[in-house]
Amino acid sequence: MVDVFVPDTLDEAVGFLGHHAGAAIPIAGGTDVLVDTRTGRSAPEWLVDLSSLPGLGGVELDGEVLRLGALTRIRAVELDPELQRRAVALVEAAKVLGSVQIRTMATVGGNLCHGTPSAEMPPALLVHDAVAEIVGLGGRRSIPLAELFAGPGRTTLGPDELLTSLRARVRASSAGSCYLRQTVRWSMDLAGVGVAASVEVEGTTVTSARVALAAVAPVPLLVGSATETVVGTDLPSEVADEAGRQAAAACSPISDARGTADYRREVVSVLVPRALRIAWLRATGAWPEGVPAPVNGVWTEEDL
Amino acid sequence: MPAGPVGELQVVGHRLPKLDAPQKVTGQIAYADDLRMSGLLEGAILRSPHPHARILSIDVSAAERLPGVRAVIHAGNVEQRRFGYGDDNLPLKGDKVRFIGDEVAAVAAVDEETARRALELIRVDYEVLPAVFDPFEALEDASPSIHDELPGVVGNVAMRWDFDDGDVDAAAARAAAIVEGMYSAPQAAPAPIETHVVIASFSPSGHLTVWSPVHMVFMYRKALADCLGLDWQNITVIQPPVGGSFGGKIDIDSHDFIAVMLARHARRPVRLVMTREEEFIGTRTRQPIHFRLRTGADAEGNLLFRDAEVVSDNGAYNAWGSHAMLVAMSTITSMYRVPNSRIRCAVVYTNKNYGGSVRGFGNPQATFAVEQQMEELADALGMDPMDLRLKNANQSGDVTPQGMKITSCGLSECLRIVREQSGWDQRRGTMRDRHRGLGAAAFIHVGGGARIYGSDGCGAIVKVDDSGQVTLISGSSELGQGSETALAMIVAEEMGVPIGSVQVVNSNTDIKPWDVGVHASRTTFVAGNAARLAAAAARDKLLATAAELLGAPPAELRIRNGMVEVAAEPDRRIDFARAVRRRLLREEGTVVMATAFYDPPTEHQDKEYRGNISAAYGFGAHVAEVEVDPGTGMVRLLNLWTAHDVGRAINPMSCEGQIEGGSAMGAGLALSEELVMFDGQIAAPNFHDYGMPTAVDVPRIVVNLVETVDPLGPFGAKGVGEAGIIPPPAAIANAIADATGIRPRAYPMRPWKVKQWIDSGERSHVVVAKGGLDDG
């Protein structure tokens, strides 16, 4: 049997987790934790219910800085009008996560801290330079989001530590992003490959870019080499393709029931250029606002 | 008897909601898992973790000592006999286990948690044996022998299905075009929402009652008696409402025997409910089948022959899946007019979960091969595939090489409808630059029963009580497919009463007359004819009494909307129920009740697989439109146009629902559903990974009902239950071929397979006989 502890404050939560290190795990939306406890993938003695803690939810914008509380529901990200303009990759990633019911319960923090290599939120936040804010018995600390992930199902958080919020960079103009993925089904599926890209431009020239991948390495992967390739260019197809090849070389997928390693690497080389091109078209204003990335990946620039 | 035109029908042909729909949508219906009874114990099964192992010893002492445990059984402490075709199976395995999930021991305890804890305390020593998972490897001499205890089994071949008609080699020699290739169908699951469940209870006097959502109840009862040494007169089988089956619950399985043995040992009622994981791992699957097929035609597009080498992957034991070739064979020999055919099929044991009966039963698999080759052949001949199909389409009056007598047949009309609606002539072959394509597939399937047993009959009783309520007691069962409503409509039509006056009782073997069971899309046809005959006989009794009251001979009377009236003078009429009371409430009165048994005029196939197995055959055609992402191999199903020859739609809404549901399942088979297995272990036995399509994956489906009014069907109806699932894998494969130029070789056409075919340039293998060899 599992007992549930409902803390009133963050300090109480952290204190309890620290005291019951290894035997207590936090639960927010519960969409992963409850499945894990039921299938025996984890067997905690205590669940620490974070869902009523104050101050850990919400989407706030301060200039170019987005603050996203760890308890923010995925559905709230999906429906946020400001994020729909400024952080399209994040919204596109939210839209394809589970079902409406799952998204209404699941939280951003939970999606990150579960450590699933195929999770949607990590790549979408990585391309927005997210920083994770963490609290534990030792106080508060901030780390680049990429440093949160330790391996499949594992993070670098101590047993007493909680992710409280994310800070991310979301420019209001001359920036664009995109999230694409390969799945077996068209909904309710885990990514076989997930790709997020963001681009910032001056005029049409790329000044900054990020590419992040899901499901093709033990952890969500930020691909530095791919971004260096595209900076300073007008992101023509050849350059985007080259970035795709670099991303494919940087990842280390496995073969499983969702596809072979070779296939996944090839899909990375296909989806990275697409995501970069769409992000660039969005940054330069060539992509009509509100138009989603084509779910089938098939579009021609004449369609725009 | 031929049915009248639709305009004269009062109930049949109207769109009616299912009778049980209000109970189902409000959650009031009680499925087997909702049943409560005092003293009920929960059972659980210990399953083999090894794909192939010898059982050296089983120690259950610790499990027996656990408080709350009431029975622990295994092969060493129960009486059980072999079951399955060829007696190759035992409920609890004694000598060997043959797949991961095989039943080894079972527990009954006061609650589920205790039962599961007790399983962990059972100690089984295994000697692990080499296992074989690939049916082609299982055929090799060096392969492990899975049923070494059965002297008749050589080289892991469970059975063969070989067929010859005409001279294939001579036909091939004069063919203008021949296509050949491999086509594979995977292991898939029926995946009903209600998992398998059974409750067994013995009365103090030893009478056994079993509650089970099985759909061949009378055979189930006999199988229980045979395997467990029980008196079958002393067994009642009650079928609670079925929460989905799709064939998976057709007949008996190990866990049914185990529940009864547990109840016998514990002297208490016992329930066994499969978990979702067990449902995937331990209940029957759709038989994977591999076809190497050749089809040839002359220069004018007349089919000359089909030649098939088939390996059917049986899994560990023979269940219904071993007979999926029965239907697959009929598609190879009889889909279109094929003057010469040859089939060599081996059904091969492997160390995997074994095949059962799933909707379509071998036909989606065979149609995937046969209908892809129709389009490949048309392309090789430079013909339009629809023209090739129409040229060779089965027609009324045909007798196929297996002796199937084609009576009503709307195949050509179905083809013409989907051709027109999909814009086939304008669009096929023109959308490759947009990665879009159209593909078609047709089907033939039994639609008037299937004689696989001594009788293919069904009994019916119709009684009318003093209130005028009509009760149909049917041998056949409702699985959620809407047959209960269709049967009630047939009775209401025949008796001239409103549908609301008709009740259907069909769930208890003590009450209902014998029936083979629900399978082969036979219920509307066979049980419908039985119900119609009983209703007509009850009506005639009633008319005889009404004649006395109305002072007119019975032949001049008719019943409409519950009133008996003189046909020529409709104002001379009496209430239907009054005639019943008149007959009943008097000295020497009688009840209005009639029985009927309908066994269709069909033949058992002989040893060479010839015989008119069904009294009618269903036909239909689908066109699928897809969009393929050549970069990822992802396929989006955009549209599905369907036309089905249903004979007559008893309830058009229900027919459309069956076709839509079947098509959605077929789309799932085509694109995503598979029990992916590594070394005999199903990788992810859950709905998340299995790949059943969601509402987002199911496209717009257009349904056309073609009514050919079958001469033997009730009001002209033919079976439609399985039909929708048959064409989609083939139609979608053909559409992918049109969109990309590649030729799919296996389903599900998951993205990485499509990508691999695109990258490797997988093409049709065309042999142009008159112009030498051309590989592409």
Image: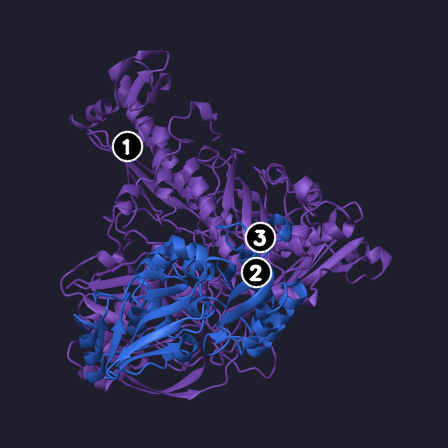
Chain colours: A blue, B purple
What label sits on residue B338 in the rendered view? none
Q: Nearer the viewer, residue B426 or A57?
A: A57
Q: Is residue A101 visible?
A: yes
Asked whether, in this view, residue B566 is left or right of residue B332, the answer is: left
Question: Which chain is home to disc 3?
Answer: A
Q: Which residue is mark 3?
A: A286
What's under tag 1, amino acid-wise? Answer: Gly
Discs 1 and 2 share one subunit: no
CA–CA distance in space, label 3 to label 1: 62 Å
Q: Which residue is mark 2?
A: A280
Q: Dot 1 surroundings within 10 Å: few (below 14), some, or many (20 or more)?
A: few
Q: Which residue is mark 1?
A: B500
Q: Dot 2 surroundings within 10 Å: few (below 14), some, or many (20 or more)?
A: many
Mark 3 element type: loop
Question: Which chain is home to disc 2?
Answer: A
Q: Position of residue B313 (x, y in %)?
A: 54, 69
